[in-house]
Amino acid sequence: MPAVVVLGAQWGDEGKGKATDQLGSRVDYVVKFNGGNNAGHTVVIDGEKYALHLLPSGILSPGVTPVIGNGVVVDLAVLFAELDAISARGVDTSRLLVSSAAHIIAPYHQTIDKVTERFLGKRKIGTTGRGIGPAYADKINRLGIRVQDLFDEHILAQKIEGSLDQKNHLLVKVYNRRAITVEETLEHLLSYAERLRPMVADTPLVLNSALDQGRTVLFEAGQATMLDVDHGTYPFVTSSSATAGGACTGSGVGPTRIDRVVGVIKAYTTRVGEGPFPTELHDDTGEWLRKTGGEYGVTTGRPRRCGWYDAVIARYSSRVNGLTDLVLTKLDVLTGLDKVPVCVAYDVDGVRHDEMPADQSAFHHATPVYEELDGWWEDISHCRTFEELPVNAQRYVLALEEMSGTRVSAIGVGPGRDATIVRHDLLG
């Protein structure tokens, strides 16, 4: 049975949660391998909407074991608030596993995140202010607190003290904020320890053993390719590896065990936060896409920036992730347009670029080269086979498939769990 990675192929908010949820009924484990509660997945089941931020989407699928991998940073307050919220709606959360090596977001990480972003002013990154970046920075600086540390109060206190030695100088002397005490942080984190304890596991061992036994494991990315800390539009990125390689480092499963890599991509493009976005629309059409597509952040409520489909980004994402399949979402949003522009290349100072410029400055100054495809007016939300789509909608999908260099295996035609056209089996 396969190990399948599902990730975002643009700047996020492509509908990964729905794609993962649809596969969830056919898999045994769903693993979140990067990020924290700085991104949200919306899943609609029988008309009920679930907004997940930290939890893997697989927690909504009966019989699936959801796993928070070692590559994730965990805000314990958010974790238990989410568990309580969906438990109250009748969802069984008892199978959740949390890696003992996952890092913890402490309250001081959130404080540092917010004051730093405010201090940057017009140079701000556009973070969610949830402490994700500072937690990852501590991880890399070897000042981090891991889940396993919560069960040794002496070690936990030492680690908090070591981290705050530096941060309090910054908070007091640079940002004019009060110092944070070791005691208040220790009390906050220890208050969650006993509830967390039964969930903690050696998740790399669990997952590799599952694959050895022929189980199916799905790896679910937070954020998306263009927000990857290495391969995204740096510095306007997240602080973790959201590409396919991150599935291995963030879960403890080796690359030779991965069978499929599925990129989820919208029929148009959105992004949140700061940074370059070549196809962004600043006119009424952009606002129409935003309202029609419901493009507001699940986690933050921020309006998303909207633009046309970018085939250059799609080709780049296919390459750096080694995509085997694309899931094209929100095709129904484009219904009612006479013409649908698609970005096929960039113009940078009079030079055409068919591939993503390696120089970030060139990308920042890129203007889109468009081709226009014929639109359609028919309601497609009831379509369940490719042949049921209007001819122009079919042609649009086939054109994107050719431009993007990866087959389109599934097409989303509405928000519901069943509103999907399957062309190729993602697990077959």
Image (cartoon, grey):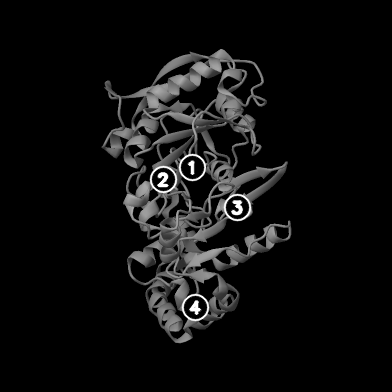
- Residue at left 41%, top 45%? 227
Disc 1 residue type (three-letter): Gly
Q: Which mark is residue 208?
A: none
Residue 27 seen in the figure: yes
Location of residue 269 in the rendering, given as x and y in whole percent from the top left corner = 49, 32
Query: Residue 12, which numbered label?
Result: 1
User: Could you tell me which residue is drawn at 40 percent across and 55 percent down?
Assistant: 239
Query: Would you name the residue on which mark 2 appears?
Result: 227
Badge 2: few (under 14), some or many (20 or more) residues near its Cα, within 10 Å?
Answer: many
Which mark lies nearer to you, 1 or 3? Answer: 3
Q: According to the image, label 4 marks what residue?
A: 150
* Image quadrant where residue 70 sits: bottom left
Marks 1 and 2, how far apart in space? 8 Å
Which mark is first along the chain, 4 or 3? 3
Q: N-terminal of the two: label 1 or label 4?
A: 1
Residue 55 as seen in the image, left or right of residue 364: right
Q: Amino acid at mark 2?
A: Leu
Q: Helix or strand or loop: what does disc 2 sit on?
A: helix
Does residue 338 appear anywhere in the picture? no
Cα gap from disc 3 to disc 2, whole angstroms: 19 Å
Of the numbered discs 3 and 2, the one sitting upstream in the chain is 3
Q: Residue at x 36, y 54 (%)?
A: 248
Which percent across, then down, holds residue 360?
30, 39
Residue 335 percent across, percent down from the top left: 61, 21
Q: Are marks 3 and 4 in contact (CB under 8 Å)?
A: no
Closer to the camera in the image, 13 or 171: 13
Tell me the kind of residue under disc 4. Answer: Leu
